[in-house]
Image (cartoon, rainbow, N blue to C red):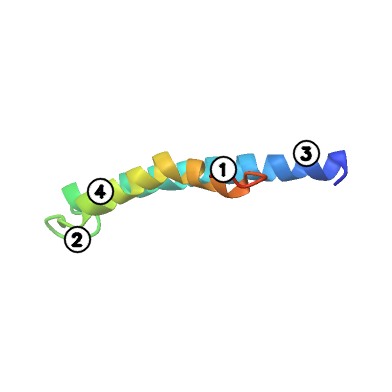
Amino acid sequence: MTPEEETAQWRNRFILMNLIRIGGTIGVLLSILLWQSDTFVRGGSFLGFPLALLFLVISFFGPKYAAQQWRTPPGP
C-alpha cells in the first residue's frame, strides 16, 4: 500500500469513527425528544428512554468496536 493510500485509509477511518459518535449523539437527542416532548407523539412515548440508552451505548462503544475490526493482525 502506498503512503497516500494509507493516509487516505486512516483519514476515512477517523471520519467514520467521528460519524458514529455524532450519529449516536443525534440519536440520543432525538430519543429524548420522543420521550419527553410532543414533537413526534402527543404526550411523549416510553420508547424514547430505551432508544436513548441504546444510542448512548452506540455513541460510546461503536468507535471502539470499529477500531477492533480494523486491527491488524487481529488480537485475542
| Three-letter code for the amino acid on which mark 4 is drawn | Leu
Q: Position of residue 65 (x, y in %)?
A: 49, 46
Distance from Cα at disc 4 to Cα at disc 1 = 30 Å
| Three-letter code for the amino acid on which mark 2 is drawn | Val
Q: Which of marks 3 and 1 is nearer the N terminus?
A: 3
Question: Residue shown at 20%/50% (left/top)?
Answer: 49
Question: Residue shown at 22%/52% (left/top)?
Answer: 50
> Mark 3, mark 1: which one is toward the viewer?
1
Distance from Cα at disc 2 to Cα at disc 3 = 46 Å
Q: Earlier in the sequence, mark 4 or mark 1?
A: 4
Per the image, label 3 sits on a secondary structure element best described as helix
Residue under pointer 4 = 33
Per the image, label 2 sits on a secondary structure element best described as loop
Q: Position of residue 29 (x, y in %)?
A: 32, 44
Residue under pointer 3 = 7
Per the image, label 1 sits on a secondary structure element best described as helix
Distance from Cα at disc 1 to Cα at disc 2 = 37 Å
Q: How crowded is mark 2: few (under 14 residues within 10 Å), some or many (20 or more)?
A: few
Q: Is residue 46 left or right of residue 21?
A: left
Residue under pointer 2 = 41
Can residue 74 be seen at all in this image of the molecule?
yes
Per the image, label 4 sits on a secondary structure element best described as helix
| Three-letter code for the amino acid on which mark 1 is drawn | Ala
Residue under pointer 1 = 67
> Mark 1, mark 2: which one is toward the viewer?
1
> Mark 2, mark 3: which one is toward the viewer?
3
Q: Residues within 10 Å of mark 3 (few under 14, many from 20)?
A: few
Q: Which of marks 4 and 3 is nearer the N terminus?
A: 3
Q: Earlier in the sequence, mark 4 or mark 2?
A: 4
Q: Is residue 75 left or right of residue 35?
A: right
